[in-house]
Every structure is written in structure tokens, then in C-alpha cells.
Image (cartoon, helix red, strand yellow):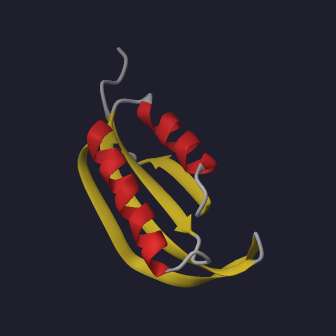
């Protein structure tokens, strides 16, 4: 039988080159987008600003945010696509949280 929903975790590294306000706006934008399509959304901003292991697009620091949510299996692919085409997102990774 097909899964109705699953738990996912998304780690996103946001760019700091446009300023802190632009980065915080992106964090809230993606939180709102996930809340529209998923349930039990949590945002863990404890990681915050960190030095990158290697430069990405000439940047040496990024702002790490982890979103945890539960949704249908087709939504994480759409979220990943949106993250990949958004300016201000350096890297992202969507993973399934095993039960």
C-alpha cells in the first residue's frame, strides 16, 4: 500500500550577501510555503551563521536552517525544485526521517 504521508527534514544554507533582513525574509517565506503544503512544521534555527567548508558562489559563510515537517510524498520534490531556483539559497537537502 502506498504511503499517505511521511516525515521529512530539509536543511537549507541561505546566502548572507544580500543582508540579514533578506535572509530572514527567505526563512519566513519557505516556512510559510511549507506550512501551506504540510503539517507539523518546525523550524530549528539553532545552527545559525556558520563558516562554510568551501566557498560557494564566492561566499565563505552561510545561515543554516532546518525545517521538519510531515507531508505527502510528492511535495518534497516540489520544495527541492523551488529551493534550487531561488536566489539567496546556496544549498539544500531534503531527507526522509525514518520511523
Q: In this view, does 51 lie above or below 91?
A: below
For residue 26, side relative to residue 34 (left or right): right
Q: Is residue 7 above or below residue 26?
A: above
Q: In this view, does 4 lie above or below 42?
A: above
Q: Nearer the viewer, residue 82 or 70?
A: 82
Q: Nearer the viewer, residue 98 or 68?
A: 68
Quadrant the C terminus occupies: top left
What residue sits 57% from the left and 40% below the top?
81
Quadrant the N terminus occupies: top left
For residue 84, side relative to residue 36 (left or right): right
Residue 90 falls in image quadrant = bottom right
| Residue 38 can be seen, yes or no | no
Q: Where is residue 96 in the image (x, y as percent from the top left)?
A: 44, 45
Farthest residue, direction left = 40
| Residue 73 can be seen, yes or no | yes
Q: Position of residue 98 (x, y in %)?
A: 39, 46
Q: Which of 66 and 36 is in front in this view?
A: 36
What residue sits 54% from the left and 68% below the top?
14
Farthest residue, direction top = 1
Q: Position of residue 4 (x, y in %)?
A: 30, 24
Q: Where is residue 91 in the image (x, y as percent from the top left)?
A: 62, 60
What residue sits 44% from the left and 68% below the top?
65
What residue sits 47% from the left and 80% below the top?
20
Amino acid at each position: 500500500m502506498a504511503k499517505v504521508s511521511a516525515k521529512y527534514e530539509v536543511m537549507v544554507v541561505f546566502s548572507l550577501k544580500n543582508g540579514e533582513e533578506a535572509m530572514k525574509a527567505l526563512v519566513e517565506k519557505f516556512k510559510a510555503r511549507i506550512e501551506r503544503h504540510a503539517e507539523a512544521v518546525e523550524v530549528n534555527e539553532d545552527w545559525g551563521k556558520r563558516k562554510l567548508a568551501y566557498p560557494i558562489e564566492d561566499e565563505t559563510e552561510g545561515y543554516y536552517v532546518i525545517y521538519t515537517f510531515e507531508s505527502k510524498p510528492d511535495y518534497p520534490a516540489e520544495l527541492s525544485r523551488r529551493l534550487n531556483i531561488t536566489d539567496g539559497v546556496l544549498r539544500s537537502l531534503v531527507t526522509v526521517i525514518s520511523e
